[in-house]
Amino acid sequence: MKMRTNPLFLSCSFALAAAAGGQTIPLLAPPQSGFVFPQKQTLTYAVDWRVFPAGTAVVHFEDTGDRERISASADTTGAINLIFHVSDRFQSTFDRAKGCSYEFDKQTVEGRRQINSTLRIDYGESKSILDEKNMVKGQSKHVEVPISSCLTDLLSGIFYASSQPMEVGKSFLIPVVDALHTVIVTMKVEGREEVKTPLGTFKTIRVQPTAEAGVVKNRGNIWIWYTDDERHLPVQMRARLFWGTITFRLTGNDSK
């Protein structure tokens, strides 16, 4: 089993890393009036690869004044851990009123690959700034790329989407900042569905993130099931990729 791209982070971050292809970058719509992001909450997901337990993902929300901080971890377990070890840490900070991301940090351990990176979005200077270090090879990289407006990032985008109206048969656009590009993600609201997880059965709205380029288009499909209520809590996520299907199912939702 070959897993050069971390399957845990792949599905919960849209797996998008491609140019917007010259498209006009849409404005990031602010959260709906009255929508409240979690101020102190921890979501835990069991992760399966095909029919096998593959790992655990944990997402924690923290209120930091006018900003929201999301911390996430992804770790392989059991037999999958022996085949391809993953232990990743992510952190994102964004403006709760506007949705704009300010920083996205990653510390990734995936097999023999170990990369630490920080992506900062400087709206005053209209640029994103990436500092990355390969911990195995000792190589560093610094990249600055111009941006045009408020953007979300690969982690925050999943939960920013919760703040938007979800009407079956309609779509909304999210401009996502990546290390080298801005990616336009279309969130297609496909239908309603009842989903069973270890935490219970939920009435949900199924949303498919798509893009005109990148690994989503080239390698597979991703879906996110949000609760069909004002929270739009993601209770299940699935990535169907060329080497198999990865599914996240909510197992814990704690106010801590």
Image (cartoon, helix red, strand yellow):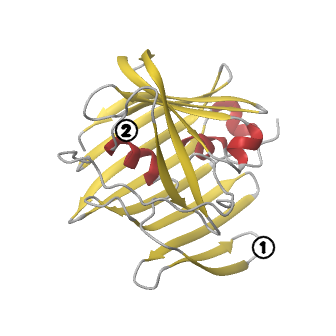
In the image, residue 47 lies at what x, y percent? 56, 31
The local secondary structure at tag 1 comes to loop
> What's the distance in space between the residues labelled 2 and 1, CA to CA?
34 Å
Question: Looking at numbered disc 1 in the image, what kind of residue is underneath it?
Answer: Lys
In the image, residue 254 lies at what x, y percent? 28, 36
Residue 18, placed above or below residue 134: above
Q: What is the tally of numbered marks visible in this picture?
A: 2
- Residue placed farthest to the bottom in the image? 125
Residue at left offset 41%, top offset 54%: 71
- Residue placed farthest to the right in the image? 1
Nearest the viewer among 99 and 33 is: 33
Q: Is residue 168 left or right of residue 141?
A: left
Q: Is residue 237 left or right of residue 61?
A: right
Residue 119, placed above or below residue 60: below
Q: Earlier in the sequence, mark 2 or mark 1?
A: 2
User: Looking at the rendering, in which quadrant would you find the C terminus?
Assistant: top left
The residue tagged 1 is: 137
Label 2 vs label 1, nearer the camera: 2
Q: Residues within 10 Å of mark 2 (few under 14, many from 20)?
A: many
Residue 181, placed above or below residue 43: below
In the image, residue 192 lies at what x, y percent? 42, 19
Q: Quadrant of residue 77?
A: top right
In the image, residue 39 lies at what x, y percent? 23, 50
Residue at left offset 64%, top offset 80%: 143
Nearest the viewer among 178 and 243 is: 178
The residue tagged 2 is: 43
Q: Which mark is residue 228?
A: none
Residue at left offset 59%, top offset 46%: 9
Residue at left offset 30%, top offset 61%: 98
Q: Quadrant of residue 103?
A: bottom left
